[in-house]
Amino acid sequence: MYQNGYNLDLESNLPRFSYDEKKIPHIPGSKISIIQTKFYSEYTDSCVDKFEKIMMNAGVKKSDMTRDMIPGTLEVPLAARTIVRSIAPSAIAFFGGVVDTDTKHAEMIMQIFSQEISEVILQTDTPILVGLIYVPKVRMLIDRCEDNSKNYGIKIAQATAEIVSFRLKYQKYSRHELVSPSLVDS
């Protein structure tokens, strides 16, 4: 069964992300930063490992990737701004987990994070691919981090390579070649 372009596992209703090395854009010379939260890192480590492997298959050198561990999801926007100002990466990939509880804490984290990360993306003009797994139970987080076709690192790696490739395509042109002369003068 397909939904939104992904093959769903009918038993768990989790998407299976197909990984075809030939379909991943080749992005050599790109600088990729990875931000990971300490919360649930024992599970999300496998997503980051899968992400790094796919990025290297896409031509990104290990030396052109940074990997930083930060306390939690609310610190991601600040960490992303710091990274952009320091090394100006081609893209940032973020991995973390938020498990909802009976309190409103997880919901509050998600609302603040969503608003803040959107602002960082627009203010810094840097793609930030969000591998934040927000689930009601830890078991569901584990399912999305296992070393199989459901691993979230695959999805984030594909999206990272695609957006970096897209941006490289348009960096070939100057601003004046992309914008009508009448719009530049006004």
Image (spheres, helix red, strand yellow):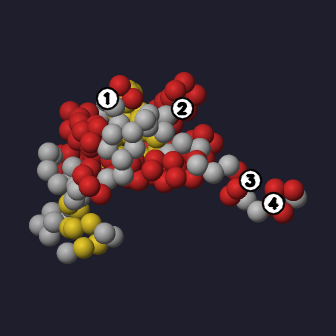
Q: Earlier in the sequence, mark 4 or mark 3?
A: 3
Q: Earlier in the sequence, mark 1 or mark 3?
A: 1
Which element is circle 4 on?
helix
Query: Which residue position holds label 3?
Result: 176
Give the Cα separation between the discs numbered 2 and 1. 17 Å
Which element is circle 2 on?
loop
Q: Callout 4, which amino acid? A: Pro
Tell me if label 4 and label 3 are in contact, CB under 8 Å: yes
Crowding at dot 1, Cα within 10 Å, few <14 / some 14-19 / many 20+, comes out as: few
Q: Is residue 158 visible?
A: yes
Query: Which residue position holds label 4?
Result: 181
Residue situated in front as seen by the camera: 22 or 15: 22
Q: Quadrant of residue 124?
A: top right
Q: Is residue 117 above or below residue 64?
A: below
Picture quarter with the C terminus: bottom right
Give the Cα separation between the discs numbered 2 and 4. 30 Å
Tell me if label 2 and label 1 are in contact, CB under 8 Å: no
Query: Which residue position holds label 2?
Result: 88
Which element is circle 1 on?
helix
Q: Earlier in the sequence, mark 2 or mark 1?
A: 1
User: Which residue ends up furthest to the right in the rendered image?
Assistant: 186
